């Protein structure tokens, strides 16, 4: 499993694995590709859109695994964010432009926002030093809320992001469960632990002779909504009861 957020380091590790002739590679995200070794992807938002597979039903190459359908749930996340911050007409989107999946997610989020009459402000982060500048830009542009996409770099610096959101009094929704542990206000995401368990089944089948080209990409069966009432109180927000009753977990 490959976890570093630096693309160059990730490619270097992948090259070493290819040289070692491993039987399969399990990788989160969209940054590792090889034509010679079976790859089981985990939590890729739109594997067809980024060109990893020909279709979900018949991947057609050496890549298969699990999608977390990020582009398809952009509208749902915006709706949830608007419920807790109803007066927000301008929402910032924090994303990593080097992540092909994030780029597609931004387009899907912008499209969903247009149908809701919401203006979006896309903010690129490529390195840890970019986070403070991104939040400074939100303040200058008077963004009313924040939509944080799922990316290894963003997840790694989740605590810093949540702290900056608290400092700026910005309500935010997060697309990665790591933000549950660091005080994120709203999380609407797939259960990553379950996705990795499912990835193990894919690897097992490949080791028994199955071909990734013939193994359909699995989509998540469930998204969890997690609400942190402590963070809401600190931000001066009242969480609607209609939102609380739909939550899978409420942190008090």
Image (cartoon, helix red, strand yellow):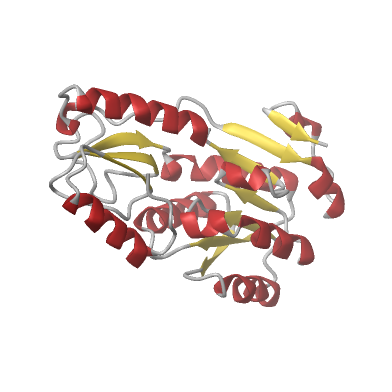
Q: Residue furthest front?
A: 20
Horizontal and vertical percent position of residue 69? 41, 39
| Viewer-side residue, 17 vs 220 | 17
Number of on-image labels: 0
Horizontal and vertical percent position of residue 186? 68, 44
Question: Does residue 161 sit above or below 218 in this rendering?
Answer: below
Horizontal and vertical percent position of residue 198? 39, 26
Quadrant into which the C terminus falls: top right
Quadrant into which the N terminus falls: top left
For residue 246, side relative to residue 10 (left or right): right
| Residue at image coords 45%, 57% | 106
Rendered image quadrant of residue 225: top right
| Residue at image coords 50%, 45% | 74
Rendered image quadrant of residue 80: top right
- Taking the image as drawn, is residue 247 in sight? no
| Residue at image coords 38%, 54% | 104
Rendered image quadrant of residue 220: top left
- Taking the image as drawn, is residue 4 in sight? yes
| Viewer-side residue, 51 vs 73 | 51
Horizontal and vertical percent position of residue 222? 51, 27
For residue 131, side relative to residue 86 (left or right): left
Question: Does residue 28 sit above or below 154 in this rendering?
Answer: above
| Residue at image coords 34%, 59% | 10
């Amino acid at each position: 499993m490959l976890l570093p957020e630096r693309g160059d380091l990730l490619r270097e590790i992948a090259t070493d694995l290819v040289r070692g002739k491993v039987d399969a590679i399990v990788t989160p995200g969209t940054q590792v590709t090889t034509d010679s070794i079976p790859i089981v992807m985990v939590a890729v938002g739109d594997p067809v859109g980024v060109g990893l597979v020909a279709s979900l039903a018949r991947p057609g190459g050496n890549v298969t695994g699990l999608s977390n359908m990020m582009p398809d749930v952009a509208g749902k996340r915006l709706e949830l964010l608007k419920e807790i911050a109803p007066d927000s007409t301008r929402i910032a989107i924090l994303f990593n432009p080097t992540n092909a999946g994030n780029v597609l997610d931004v387009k899907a989020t912008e499209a969903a926002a247009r149908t809701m009459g919401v203006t979006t402000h896309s903010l690129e982060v490529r390195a840890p030093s970019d986070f403070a500048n991104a939040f400074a830009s939100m303040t200058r542009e008077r963004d009313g809320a924040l939509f944080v996409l799922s990316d290894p770099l963003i997840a790694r610096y989740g605590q810093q992001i949540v702290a900056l959101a608290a400092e700026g009094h910005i309500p935010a929704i997060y697309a990665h469960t790591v933000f549950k542990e660091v005080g994120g206000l709203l999380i609407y995401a797939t259960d990553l632990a379950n996705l990795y368990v499912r990835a193990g089944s894919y690897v097992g089948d490949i080791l028994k002779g199955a071909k990734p080209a013939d193994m359909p990409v699995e989509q998540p069966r469930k998204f969890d909504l997690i609400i942190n009432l402590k963070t809401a109180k600190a931000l001066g927000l009242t969480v609607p009861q209609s939102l609380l009753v739909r939550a899978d977990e409420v942190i008090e």
